[in-house]
Image (cartoon, rainbow, N blue to C red):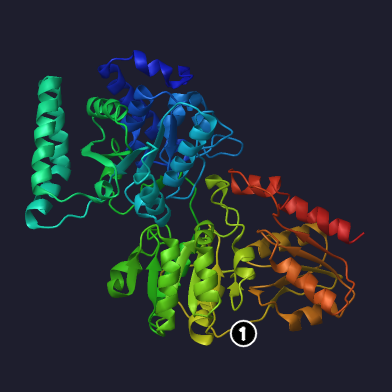
Amino acid sequence: MNLFDIKDPTFLKNLSLTELEDLSEDIRSFLIESLKKTGGHLSSNLGTVELIIALHYVFNSPKDAIIFDVGHQAYTHKILTGRAKEFESLRQTDGLSGYINYKESIHDMWESGHAGTAMSALYGLLYAKMMKNEDGEGIAVIGDASIMNGMSVEALNLLGNDPNKRGIIILNDNQMSISKSVGSLSKALIRFRSNKVVIKSKRIWQRILPDIILRILSRIKRSVRTLLQRKNIFEDLGYMYIGPIDGHDLKGLIYNLKRISKIKKSVVLHIITDKGKGHKDAENDSIGTYHGVSKVSHKVKEGITWSQCIAAGLDQLQTFKETFVIMPAMTVGTKMDNFEKKYPNRYFDIGIAEEHGATMAAMMAHQGVPVFYPLYATFSQRAFDQILNDIARSNHHVVFGIDRAGIVGEDGSTHQGLFDVSMFGLMPNFVITMPYDAQEAFDLLYYGFVNQSHPFVIRYPRGRVSHDIKEDIKFNTIKPVWTYFKKGIDPLVLIGYGPSLDLLKDAADQSGIDATIINARFIKPIDEHMLKDILSKDVKVLVYEEASNIGGLYPMILKYMAKHELKHKIVEMSITDMVVEHGHYQDVLKKCHMDKDSIIKHIKDLMK
């Protein structure tokens, strides 16, 4: 069928099983071809095609609310709710979001780009329906990694013990078995029934045998399982547990979802899916290379990613200081896979558990172990309390690598790295830095681990940096001061940090102003000696931050000026008190009035 003709999911109820299976193949082919042009999350969406078709076939969205954890696996949901024709704009400026988006559709019931939130949202939905006396189901779709997140476990505990609420949980398991079993026979049974070959073979019997025979066999299986196997964690928490079943068998999914709709208590349906199904390379990807893909480009990319730069620097640093890496499920994204292989005894992936990782890092630092804790800027916010109370308050020496700092572009509002400076800035004892180039990144790594003992942040953006990965890495001893990026003769001082310094220089040059440009690589504490030198002259000042300025560099400079009763004209450019949506990096800069043209305008206004 023409996917562009789909307006809402109601048409599914008129399709036969064969037509539904054909539709699943059409959608899978469409996604593979479409994502070549736009980029996006590939593997997770190829793995959920049949599940989402079955959900919309059995339930009635939006009356029955389908809550997707994270939302990056919901492309099929977008297609079935009438958005296929917009896929050419996926993750593009002013285009279709790569995640669930309240503004796009009444069927988008939960908007969050952070894992582990669906269970809490489900519980909130059930209470909201009760308060409003509304009918309808609440269904949470959550992955095997996300369900182990602390928030998920807290919500699971509450909902499972609430006899007045009935929630449906779809556990999409594409990596490991969740249930912990005891005894060799139980373990063998778990391995057998979770084996993908065995699960796929069930499809043959489900096609051949009548439904009544299948129901009898299912009851016999449950009886045998009860005799041989201890309850799993979900049954211990009060849920009815069904599964695991083949998550690509539409007939089995529809049968079990209909069965669940008649159960009066909260239930977990455990499905086994193949991440990347239908795409050979993605199916065989065991480390997450095809989790998210970029659009096809024939441009030669110069340099390396900032993540590669930090990973390479940390590797070389081991000759001076052996460090331990705590990794919150981002090994591939932070490019730490080589480090993991090289130093397996000094590397531990804790999963999606940023809060746990922060407290674990605090204790390791308390015991004198040098710890590197890499986090995406947006995910660092999840561990605010633990970082503040367990690391900052007690001044524990943990070095944070804050990846994807600043505007992240296509990932959108939930992933923008705009608040980490504000967050760390309000915490006592923290040192916050951002390098301009690769060499400065290496030097800050060395300084953070070897020359100081406070909680230390090195933030770096999503883009690329000039460096030959084959060259030897050397570390220079630096001081916690600002540097002159460029000395000028005109009475204008531009203060910034990170790669944005190039943008400031280009803007000043294009303005015809010979400005002094300051590399404020130590964002906190500020370099008061440099400020004193700068402000001892009659100058005008522009502070540029690709971040929120609340708690950032600009207010710290204002505080210094107020303390010393300085009256210079000073303006700031930042991204403050606003939600930044997805789009190409340069487009987002322009929308936020942070692009080169906006800088030039500020410079001209200042120099009037």
Q: Tell me which amino acid carries mark 1.
A: Lys
210 lies above or below 525: above
Residue situated in front as seen by the camera: 559 or 441: 559
Q: Which residue is mark 1?
A: 479
- For the point 55% across and 48% down, the residue is 414
SS of the residue under disc 1: loop
- For the point 82% across and 56% down, the residue is 602
Q: Position of residue 139 (x, y in %)?
A: 39, 35
Residue situated in front as seen by the camera: 541 or 359: 359
34 lies above or below 175: above
Relative to 432, 335 lies left or right:
left
Crowding near the residue tagged with mark 1, few <14, some 14–19, many ≥20 C-alpha atoms within 10 Å: few
- Quarter of the image with the C terminus is bottom right
Q: Position of residue 506 (x, y in %)?
A: 72, 59
- Report which quarter residue 488 is drawn in: bottom right
Residue 406 appears in the rendering: yes
Q: Position of residue 537 (x, y in %)?
A: 88, 78
Relative to 351, 553 lies left or right:
right
